[in-house]
Image (cartoon, coloured by chain):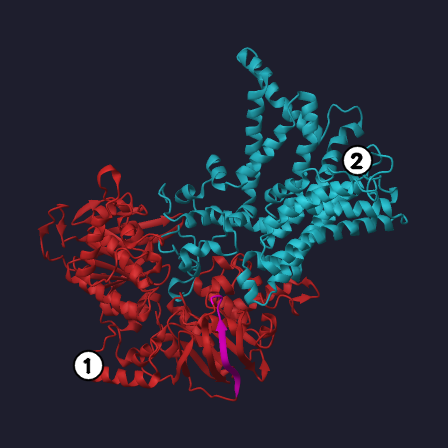
Chain colours: A red, B cyan
Amino acid sequence: MTLGWDYPLPCRRQRVEADPYTHRLVGVLKLELKGITKRFGSLVANDHIDLVVEPGQVHCLLGENGAGKSTLMNVLYGLYDPTEGEILVDGKPVVFKDPGEAMAAGIGMVHQHFMLIPVFTVAENVALGNETTKAAGLLNLEATREKIRSISDQYGFDVDPDAMVEDLPVGVQQRVEIIKALVRDAEVLILDEPTAVLTPQETDELLDIIRQLKRDGKSIVFISHKLREVKAISDTITVIRRGKVVGQADPTASPTELASAMVGRTVSLTLDKAPARTGDVTFNVNHLTVTDHNGQHVVDDLSFNIAKGEVLAIAGVQGNGQTELTEAILGVQPHVTGSITLDGEELLGKSVKHVLGAGVGFVPEDRTIDGLVSAFSISENMILDLYDKAPFARGVGMKPGVIAENATRKVEEFDVRTPSVSAAVGTLSGGNQQKVVLARELSRPLRLFIASQPTRGLDVGSIEFVHKRVIAERDHGTPVMIVSTELDEVLQLADRIAVLYRGRLVGIVPATTSRDVLGLMMAGVPAAEAEASASAHAHSGTTTAAVSEPAGLEGEPHV
Amino acid sequence: MSEKTTPEPQAASRDDAGEPVEIQGPGGTTPEAVASDVVLDTAGGQMPPSAVPAATQRRGGDHDGEGGGSVLHRIFTGNAMVSFLSVLLAIVLGGILMAVTNPKVAVTAGYFFAQPGDLLTEVIRPYAALVQGSIFNWAGADLAAQLYPITETLTVATPLICAGLGVALAFRAGLFNIGAQGQIIFGALLGAYVGFAWHLPIGLHLLVVILAGLVGGAVWGGIVGLLKARTGAHEVIVTIMLNYIASFLLLFLLTTPAFQRKGSTNPISPFLDSTALFPELLGPQFRLHAGFLVAIAATAFVWWLLNRSTVGFEFRAVGANPSAARTAGINVARSTILVMAIAGALAGLAGVAQVSGTEKYLSGGVAASIGFDAITVALLGRSTPWGTFFAGLLFGAFRAGGVAMQAQTQTPIDIVLVIQSLIVLFIAAPPLVRAIFGLNPRKKKTTKSGTAGSRTGGVKSGAAA
């Protein structure tokens, strides 16, 4: 991997032909960004960034959250004016005043958060802003439908033009976004963190789509911080750190090298952990069933246990009962039957305060919703569940001095980067917010530690930190339950893995189980069957998982 | 950033609220050593880089849902500067309105170039009268007459402050208490009854009256909290309905022998015992009574409650993020009931200030429009205790001065209502105010650094007040 300056070679023109309708050359759009600088006040989001996107190339922008990738792409897409620098299309300088002009020049963008109207059909969404009309201004959706069908057939998108967008899975919604760009004859497609919302299967499908687009001469700018995908798909990798290009990397570079370039220091992608020294089984869940307001069993007759000093990871695709399971243990779910015991004490039916008081540490899956009060200061968030306990309060009077002192100590211990403990938690980055949650939950003597999606949305450095803390708590002799939809994380932390599918337990397997088997189990295939099926696949040599990596990568976090 | 604003309304409104934002450039610590620093984030480019945490941007569109009724929340807890500028703007616009409707102004404008002073005098006269009637009467014969206006202001402000605190407190717990009117009436009803029907020794009597008022308001507010917590009934609807019930119950009771004054055909109660009245602070020639001291004490109490007590911590946590409060083991239902009871008690105190201080008897108009003005007062005070206190004083001054203004300059007292309404209008539209005063942070960002930081300061001080 080269980390110095390394301009790519001048492009070779491939297919040169004019589109009969748009009179634009097809498949030859070469995009260059020269010295792009974007300042917001004193803040330099992009600092003299040079970038060349060759036709028919997948160009990855790799960088941590906040490195300036999205800002750069928004400059390119006409959403921001660059403070300095210029954009060249096929060697000619252009200025995009708004996304419309960028689109007209052949640049399409798929945002991280989809720009779709949920109650419109696919065709209506695609036509939006570009509607063709019949006589008397009537909407001509048939033309759009036809285009969607042809694109859908060409790339195997399998999208029904008349489906309501809100009824479609996230992966299909993303395809609708891609169709939107293609209908407008995009030659360069910017995908901003496209896999953040996808399941592993959907991710594989997306990568296949990208390969097809590339074959058709489209250029793809793929923004991501997930090394596995970046390595799998890219032709060129540009690493951005703190608004600057720190170098170009080759897709063959090792994940550790890429992660180090991204973070700016050496990072370890493998977690060093000793084998679990398990003690007595203290946490038991028996025949737990959670019924939702529709009468559905969202958690269905679940039974498992966790021993002291052991990590049980709950794996599964998002929305298979994980949230309800953790909330049932915490005591915020209504309509729960079965039993949950900790050290022999029944927790079901007890108040949240009682459960927390019994020594349950709880990291909710969405820290901004359930974990933190973003308008509150760090100090206040650090005692969100201990505000009425000594030493933070005496009677109804709180002790701001003690609270601030506690926060100062915890901020130090958990390495929360903040100018002050009185800063609102909402001003912190995701990683630092999660550290605040961890600092709070791990500061009590625990008898059970539950963490849902403990590293969701975090950068490499923070993930490393969180994982170390979780393992430290395990080695402290606490039963630990991790809920994660990231297979990498599950494999890295778990001593045993329980797979959930539609609220039911598919099976509990050892942490040495292969990704393929777990992937099948996450789709509801029982453990034994999955094992057989996966080994059959391996023999025939047709592994469908496009991004499944050699064994050396197994320990990699989902960066 | 240029005129090109962000494409997502959420992003715009988040920023407009003057939310605490923080900018940390790449220079803070050794860049190479920091992996998980406070980072610059632009929410996939949807927001100006205000270090919006990665976690919140992930939720994108539905982030607004946090805390419930976010638009309202932003309006109620906005920027102190916006509040101040809104008042200023409303006064200027009110002045223009008075000028164009005053025939004398038209006359003097006719010879503006000959004697420009006349026009200015005519324009300023109503406001001069307002100040004269609310703060200091320089035309007064003696010191007492000169100071009379300010004592009037304080008298009128007393119930406004108490009721405003009730609205502000409920709002901090995420509840929009429109029901101060009904709570005032219930506080006044119970307080007055104890005041004229019971005959207790001096000192004790007043305490019992205050207690009765607190209980009356607390019950009327507590019902709302109870219904909300147990059945999910929306507090706005419930409080509005309870206002009607309280009003008509009062009118009905004033026609019953238990409440109606002996020998009177009017629906008014007997005078309260002298032992049940707040002592006059500055002698009988002024109306100012000890209720004002109670209002100061109530403000201090609410400050302590919100900022220094575990109960207030629960209220604020529930108000700012009920899900997180619940996950942290806070009993949201209990908080809802308790905060409405305390809010009602504060409004009930306003009722006591009316019957036991200003009016000295109970009538159908005892609450006037105090309960509704209290909403504006809390709004102007950004739901902070001391902010509400000073907003109450300002509105008291408007009320007291408005009377003098009408008497002296024939300017209708309704102009005061117009000014009050304009204040609310401007506070509800911070971007408008900022645009008028050229304070729009979006424009400033490209030219001047640290705008976001200074806004943080404003919000911080507001929260601390």
Identify the residue at horizontal 56%, vertical 51% (top origin). B460
> Is residue A228 in the magenta section?
no
Q: Which residues are magenta?
A: A281-294
The numbered dot on residue A541 is 1
Q: Secondary structure at mark 1?
A: loop
Quadrant of image for the N terminus of chain A: bottom left
**x, y (%) of residue B117?**
59, 16
One can see residue B342 in this view: yes
Instruction: Give x and y (percent) for residue A7.
Output: 19, 59
Query: To which quarter of the image does residue B146 belong?
Result: top right
Asked if residue B162 lies left or right of residue A479, the reply is: right
**Residue corresponding to mark 2:** B287
Q: Is residue B284 above or below residue A292?
A: above
Amino acid at the residue labelled 1: Gly
Q: Residue at x 25, y 60 (%)?
A: A159
The majority secondary structure of the magenta stretch comes to: strand
